[in-house]
Image: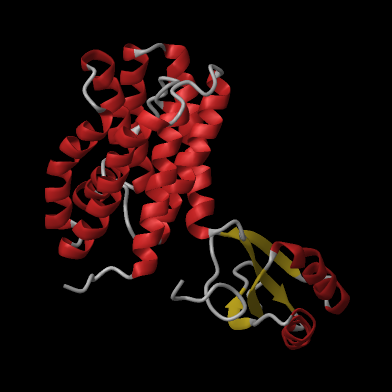
Amino acid sequence: MKSKIPFRDIFLIFIGAVIQAAGMDLFLIPGKLAAGGVTGIAQIVNRFTGWPIGVMIILFNIPLFILGWRFLGGRRFLLRTFLAVGIYALLIDVLAVYLPSNLTGDSVLNALFGGVLTGIGMGLVFRAKGTTGGTDILARLLGKWRGIPLSESYLLTDTAVVVGSALAFSWTLALYAIVALYACGLAAEIASEGSGIVRSATIITNHPQEVGEKIMRELSRGVTSWQGTGLYSGKERRILFCAISRSEVNPLKAIIYEVDPAAFVVIGQAHEALGEGFKPLSG
């Protein structure tokens, strides 16, 4: 039977799960840092029972798999999520036998390296259009059912786990777990979407044609314009918009100043730009 998941995605999910499991076994589990999620819950339960963490990750995810299949995308969702969580959970228990059990006793190093490694692994899974299960499913369900933003959902679920880790281990280790959680989020974002943050520029000028043509000619960037009206002055003026790289901010400002020193410019940080001149939309 032919797999419905492209080989590239399967490969990314596998590599991501390996890196994520290695980060857990080398740093977070030995460091007693329960940095949120179902894995954090499994670490807390392991602290009192000794049950295998990987097995518990699978067991805790089963009801979430059922809810995710029902409400978040059916078969396509379940295949990718089960693949990612299954490999990750299996490797946590398998790699623990072969990897050093206490690479460093420094909680700072455990938090930083553990957070970065697990974040890179998660980011690769996200890039393959998969999820890591657990509280990722729960956060999406809360957003769907209660309209709670994903950021708030993650905050609620991960905060509960971190508080539990404080009671299971110590408040000091719980604080280090928060550091690991933050490092994990940053690394996951970079691994899944890249570090090429772009800038968006909104330009209000009395010389839109000249400014736009100069931007297109010297920076090779597309420019969009529309008509706007100043509510205070009541005057109609053209508004230009373009997306540029970080290194093009100063050249853009120089171009605008050369044509129209009285122009009004707002430069913001865009999360991502897709299309001609940037990443392809399909990526």
Residue at the image point whose x is 32% and y is 40% from the top: 91
Residue at the image point whose x is 73% and y is 67% from the top: 264
Q: Is residue 233 above or below residue 68?
A: below
Residue 112 pos. (x, y %):
55, 31
Residue at the image point whose x is 44% and y is 44% from the top: 19
Q: Is 174 or 79 nearer to us in this picture?
A: 79
View extreme (right): residue: 258
Residue at the image point whose x is 32% and y is 57% from the top: 130
Residue 268 pos. (x, y %):
63, 59
Q: Is residue 59 above or below residue 283?
A: above
Q: Could you tell whether 150 is left or right of 82 in the image?
A: right
Q: Quadrant of residue 59?
A: top left
Q: Could you tell whether 196 is left or right of 117 in the image?
A: right
- Please give the count of numbered marks on the rendered protein: 0
View extreme (front): residue: 98
Residue 251 pos. (x, y %):
82, 69
Q: Could you tell whether 203 is left or right of 66 in the image?
A: right
Residue 189 pos. (x, y %):
50, 51
Q: Is residue 190 above or below residue 52?
A: below
Q: Is 232 or 256 nearer to us in this picture?
A: 256
Q: Quadrant of residue 276?
A: bottom right
Q: Quadrant of residue 204?
A: bottom right
Q: Is residue 25 above or below residue 227?
A: above
Q: Is 272 or 147 nearer to us in this picture?
A: 272
User: Which quadrant holds the N terminus?
Assistant: bottom left
Residue 157 in view in this figure:
no
Residue 241 in view in this figure:
yes
